[in-house]
Amino acid sequence: MTPLVLIPGMMCDARLFGPQIASLSGKRDVHLASLARPGGIVDIALAFLETAPPRFALCGLSMGGIVAMEILRQAPDRVDRIALLDTNPLAERDDVKQRRLPQMQAVREGDLAGVMRDEMKPNYLAEGPRRSDVLDLCMKMALDLGAEVFLRQSQALMDRGDQTKTLAKADLPALVLCGRHDTLCPVARHEFMAGLIPNAHLEIIDDAGHLPTLEQPLQTTAALIRWLEA
């Protein structure tokens, strides 16, 4: 059975996919790609491919989806299928780059917790009973990864390229999924992505924002199982 590779989002680790790993790891080999290593998106993808299985199913969320698209660009013959969750195929806009700069400066000055608390994850999640627990977990993941990872990842996102041509050439089973209330990577962006990929299936998760793997784990896992079995 084809191994599954999961790539977490910015300042997240395996805990972002905790429910999915628990459900799927008994059925197939599950690998986690790290975004904590130095370098830009191209470098992260290249380093992953050096040790990855020969062929794999690939799933990335947010920054993880951006890296997944770069892996697909570099090695399309090694990707059996792809799932892109709450992500963005476009290069970063100049206004978004400008908003990152004060965040990065605050983190350099020792306020990673404040940046995460006030400017990032709280704006990404839907209202609901899991919101507080998910925010707590996001903070733990971010603080465990630390300021240097935040700065490297921020720079990598600022410098990333456009992947629309990669998606238009992607002749493989593809799932494009997002939370209905994702304000960072909204539904319209995922409709655009799904329209680019010849064999894409678009799935919108109700009552979820930017992190449906944690906000609505059962629905998200079910969608991933359908994609893996298609």
Image (tube, helix red, strand yellow):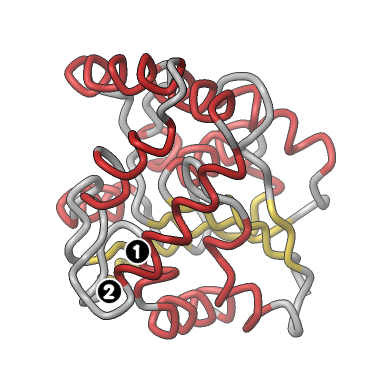
Count of marks, rendered view:
2
Image x and y of residue 134, in percent: 39, 66
Q: Earlier in the sequence, mark 2 or mark 1?
A: 1
Label 1, secondary structure: give it. Answer: strand
Is residue 77 shown above or below 26? above
Mark number displayed over residue 177? 1
Q: Amino acid at mark 2?
A: Ile
Mark number displayed over residue 126? none
Which residue occupies the foreground of this view, 44 or 216?
216
Label 2, secondary structure: give it. Answer: strand
Residue that label 2 marks:
205
Is residue 196 shown above or below 67? below
Q: What residue do we see at 64% from left, 29% from top?
A: 44
> Callout 1: 10 Å neighbours few (<14), some, many (20+)?
many
How far apart marks 2 and 1 lie (CA) works out to: 7 Å
Which residue occupies the foreground of this view, 182 or 161?
182
Q: What residue do we see at 26% from left, 52% from top?
A: 122
Image position of 101 (left or right of 43)? left
Which residue occupies the foreground of this view, 208 or 139?
139
Looking at the rendered image, the quarter that the N terminus falls into is: bottom right
Q: What residue do we see at 19% from left, 66% from top?
A: 180
Image x and y of residue 60, in percent: 51, 52
Image position of 194 (left or right of 161)? left
Q: Quadrant of residue 56?
A: bottom right
Q: What residue do we see at 33% from left, 41% from top?
A: 88
Q: Amino acid at mark 1?
A: Leu
Is residue 175 shown above or below 69? below
Image x and y of residue 110, in percent: 46, 23
Image position of 168 (left or right of 3)? left
Q: Are marks 2 and 1 in contact (CB under 8 Å)?
A: yes
